[in-house]
Image (cartoon, rainbow, N blue to C red):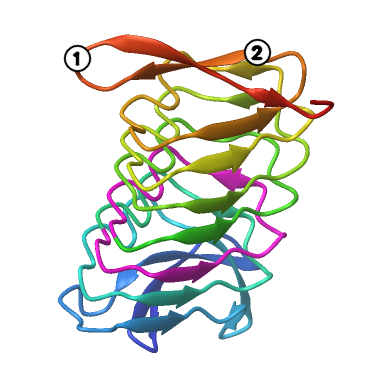
Amino acid sequence: MVIHQDNIAFSVLNDNEVKVLHLYPRTSDVTRLVIPPHVQGYRVSVIAKKAFYECTKLRRVQLPSSLHSIEDEAFGLCDKLEEITLPDSITHIGKAAFEGTLALKKVVLPRNLSVLPEALFYDSAVNDVTLPDNITQIPTACFYDCRNLRRIVLPVSVKRVASDAFHYCVNLEEVVAPTAIDHIEMFDGEKKSELKVKNYQD
């Protein structure tokens, strides 16, 4: 069953929950989106794959504390998206969820997120990212081509950084990381290099 409310289409998952499918109609010119925690008595728990993919008018999004999952590419290519509120109730974010968000500068990731997905901020404009304290690795292409990123602090829990996690981050100048990590591999399109990290005790 599909429910339409406030320019959003929801799909009923079970007796208690619904999933956000997409804007309704899909060609909606919505610029600010506030997703409610409940719709007709159902809890809003999931943002579907590509739910807001290429919603090029969308600028601000507020997500409810009932949410626990954002699926792959949910906000991919939302090139005007400037602000999104991610509640700590979220425990899963899918691949490339914020790929191509060319106006998104600052993101605070949910505290209860324990695994970062691949290509999370691929070709994004982020320059201020707060990572959750319990992640153990920075996966492949996580910050690929984030050319505005100049500094990032990796939580003490991080043990591994994928070799291409920061490729094409041509303005990245400082990485603060635990002692298990002593360098970050870089690639600017012509040559590979290593960025020495600043460890917590330095």
Name the residue located 27 percent from the left edge and 61 percent from the top edge: 78
Q: Is residue 45 left or right of residue 56?
A: right
Question: Label 2 sits on what residue type?
Answer: Asp
Question: Which label sits on residue 180?
Answer: none
Q: Quadrant of residue 92?
A: top right
At label 2, counting other C-alpha atoms closer than 10 Å, the crowd grade (few under 14, some 14-19, many 20 or more) is some
- Location of residue 95 in the rendering, given as x and y in whole percent from the top left corner: 42, 37
**Up/down of 144 relative to 189, above or below:** below
**Up/down of 161 relative to 111, above or below:** above
**Dot 2 corresponds to which residue?**
182
Which one is in front, 94 or 104?
Answer: 104
Q: Residue furthest front?
A: 202
**Up/down of 9 relative to 164, above or below:** below
Between marks 2 and 1, how big is the CA–CA gap?
A: 23 Å
Name the residue located 77 percent from the left edge and 41 percent from the top edge: 133
**Dot 1 corresponds to which residue?**
190
Does the stretch in magenta take in 50? Answer: no
Q: Which residues are magenta?
A: 78-102
Name the residue located 35 percent from the left edge and 57 percent from the top edge: 75
